[in-house]
Image (cartoon, grey):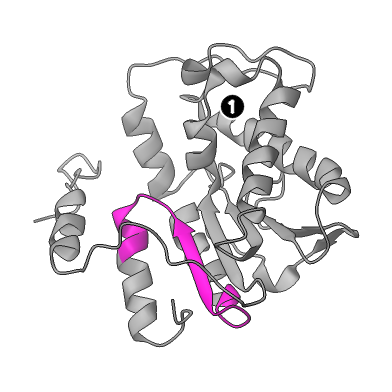
Amino acid sequence: PALFNDDGTMRKMNKSDLAKKLESVCAEVPTLPKVLNQPDNTGYVIDGMAMLQSLNESYFKTFDDLSQQVLKKILRLLEQEDLGIDVVTVVFDRYDKDDSIKQMERRRRGAGETTPSHQITGLREVPNYRLFLKGSANKAALSAFVCESIAASAPAQLKQNNTIILAGGFASGETVKLVTNSGVVMMPHLFSTQEEADTRLVLHVIDLATTHTRVIVRCDDTDVLVLLLYYYNRGLLADE
């Protein structure tokens, strides 16, 4: 079928049907195998906005509280010895491109809704969180605040050889920063003009595969699944 309607708007497809077909021919793994007697060599990649969407608003009051909740989630991943994770990469969508297919889809989702934009400061109380996240401007501001907050506070809490990579969430959407207990540095080789976390996330998975034997991707999205299968078949992903 055509990708667009007669008025130029995109047709909405049911991509989850494809994911179900793919899953039907795969063996189910109830739990990830443990890493035993090996140094930490697992990368973990997650969709940043999906992480923000999953937060329970009863655990934070201010935006500072919220950003600390995100950091705690990341640190807990790094502390899971059985998984052997030494780097967590958090990839955010970009919201600084007005004329794009992604922006068209965001406008379609928000048709008929008006979401007020909020200025974010650390001590300011978070408004109605679910309503707040319906606004693209709010998502962009929150992503930037969380990334800057983690870059500022994580070095004092990270253990040696543990790393956090932040991509897409900064005011400059191309920016990628590496956070360790020694401080924060830019990663220009991973700078990207990609707007969606779905595709940008794959770039980071491929990069981690050059230094890690296993990469875990936390993302419930058919697009990402298809892309990862494609690049795995080309031999560009980790063994696991």
- From what the image shows, is residue 10 above or below residue 196? above
Q: Is residue 225 above or below residue 105?
A: below
SS assignment at label 1 = helix
* Residue 218 magenta: yes
Residue 27 placed where, x, y %? 21, 68
- For the residue pair 211 and 81, the one nearer the viewer reads as 81
Relative to 13, residue 24 above or below: below
Residues drawn in magenta: 207-225
The quarter in which the N terminus is drawn is: bottom left
* Residue farthest along the bottom direction in this orientation: 235
Between 220 and 81, the residue placed more toward the observer is 81
Using a 10 Å C-alpha cutoff, classify the residue at mark 1 as few (fewer than 14 neighbours), some (14 to 19) or many (20 or more).
many
Question: Which residue: 37% across, 58% down?
Answer: 31
Q: Which of the 4 image quadrants contains residue 211?
A: bottom right
User: Which residue is the site of mark 1?
Assistant: 138
Image point 38% across, 32% down: which residue? 107
Residue 68: percent from the left, percent from the top? Answer: 72, 32
What quarter of the picture does the C terminus occupy?
bottom left
Q: Give the left or right position of residue 45, taking residue 61 as reference.
A: left
Q: Is residue 212 above or below residue 155?
A: below
Horizontal side of 182 relative to 116 (left or right) equals right
